[in-house]
Structure formats: C-alpha cells, structure tokens
Image (cartoon, helix red, strand yellow):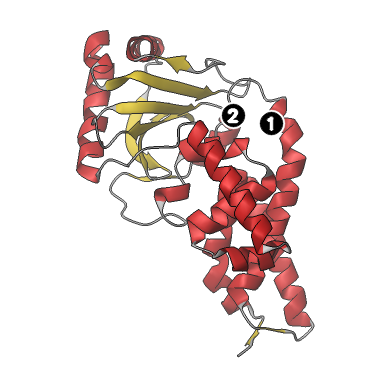
Amino acid sequence: MTVQATDDVFLAHSRAVFGLAYRMLGTVADAEDVVSETYLRWQRADAAGESVADPRAYLFTVASRLSIDVLRSARRQRVDYVGTWLPEPLVTDWDDPADIVGTRDTLSLGLLMLLEQLTPVERAVFVLREGFDYPHDDIAQLLETSAANVRQHYRRARQRLSAADEPRFVADRQLQDTLLRRFVTASLSGDVQPLADLLAADAVLYADGGGKAQAIRRPAHGSLRIARFFRGLVRQAPPDIRVDLVRANTDPALLVRTTDEVIGVYALDVDAVTGLIRAVHAIRNPEKLSRLSA
C-alpha cells in the first residue's frame, strides 16, 4: 500500500522527525532547519504526484542524511567552542506530563553531551536504534549501507559510551521532585554542607557559557566544590532574580531568570540507586536561552 505525499501525512510524523534531528544535532534551530528541508523534499514528492510506501521511513531517511551532513559541518565549530559544549535545553513546565519528542532514553542532556564523541554515522545509528527502535536492517536501508556496517557502528557507539560512563538508571519522579526542592532550599540557605550532602562525592558540574556568559570552562568535580560554586551564584544574584522549577529534556531543572531574560538553566542528573545528584548541566550561553527569554 502506498500513501500520497500530502501535508497531513507529513504533519503526522513531523514531531518524530524533529525528535530525530534534535537528538542528532543538539540544537533546536538546526533541528528545525532539518525539519523544514525534509518538508520541502516531501512537498516536491507531492508536486510530482509521487506515492510513498512508508512515509515514516521516507521522512526519517531524508532527516537522517540531512542531520549527518549538518553535524559534519558543525564539527569544526564545536572544536573551536569556548568551554564545554552542552545541548540547547528543551524546557517544559514542572507539572507538564507531556512527552517531549519521545522518551528520555536518548534525550537527557548528559547522554546528548556524550553523543558528541561519536562520528555522525555512529550517532545516527545509535539514535535510530535506541531512540526509535529501528532494526539494524532498516537502519541500513535508511543510511544506504549494509546491516553488517550498521552493527559495527552500533557496537562502536556502545563501547565509546560505556567507556565515557553512560548514565545510570533514572530516578523516579517523586525522588526528583523532592531532591530538586531540597536543592533550591539548600542553595538559598548560603550554607555549603547542606547542599553538598545532596551531591554524590564524585559529582560533576558541566557549564556552557559559550564565551558569552560567565561560566567555568572546565568541568568541576566533587560535591564541596560544586556546592561552593552555587553559593557563589546565589551571593552574586541580581535583586530581581526568580527561580522556576522546570524540566529540561525531562530532567529536573532550575530555570533562573531576571525581569528581562532567562540567564541560566541548571539540570540535575539524579542517580536512582543512591538518590543523590551525580551531575549538574548548567546552560548559560544566551544564544541557547534566547527562545526561553522570548
């Protein structure tokens, strides 16, 4: 059975296409550009009166290849990036149960940051397999390669992520809720130890200022060091500061804003086993926060 390449069919899959492109590229603007170009190619198929046997496969094929091309061109820019590069956060209200472009398994900021270590093709294979449950044979067709090559790329991707400390089991919603509120209270108290007690001894703080906002340029390790960092942030905060509890890529997070703009998103990676924060991802680059400010 074939399907006519109409706008309605595209819209039914557009959210998944964005989810694929965002996981590949880590920025909303680039992902939206991929979706737009995918739509243009879909329109050309419609104008030509073409029918598509599997619309999702067709759209994912186009989006995957476009994302690989964009990622290859972006590699040089990220090599020259000032400080730590973090993905642009997808922020939702704390109580919003809506699923944003798929499940957390390949959406968390921590994992997206780790995916930067993969080659563009390895990343495409990993995202299609883990994020969208595509079999190896289908991925091979999408990327115009052999199933054997896909298996090799997937194996290499898994090995690299394992060596880089792949994220552990995710804590449940109630634990995340409790820990985030305790984190806010401890941060505002001005005392280091109550905040350090919420962090794993080997916790890591990653901060992305992009050379445009004040941020540490290298990851900070250790609960006490991170606690002191947040105490310093609170002491330097402007008088019109406001903190909202949100979710960034489904992780519990703090959205920090002034009257005029968002100045930071701080996402917490909570370990389900220990119940402690194992990583904090601080996005302060104004280019990655401009959509939230708007």
Pointer 1 with pointer 2, Cβ within 8 A: yes
Tag 1: residue type? Arg
Q: Is residue 288 left or right of residue 40?
A: left
- Disc 1 and disc 2: Cα gap in Å? 7 Å
**Count of labels shown?**
2
Q: Check residue 225 in the rendering and tell me which mark sits there, or answer none.
A: none
Looking at the rendered structure, the secondary structure element under dot 2 is: loop
Percent coordinates x, y for residue 110 in the rendering: 46, 35
Instruction: Name which residue lies at 25% across and 35% down.
Output: 273
Of labels 1 and 2, earlier in sequence is 1
Q: Is residue 30 above or below residue 276?
A: below
Q: Which one is in front, 269 or 239?
A: 269
Based on the displayed image, in which of its 4 quarters is residue 65 positioned? bottom right
Percent coordinates x, y for residue 278 in the rendering: 35, 27
Q: Which residue is mark 2?
A: 85
Q: Is residue 77 above or below residue 98?
A: above
Instruction: Name which residue lies at 63% across and 88% down.
Output: 2
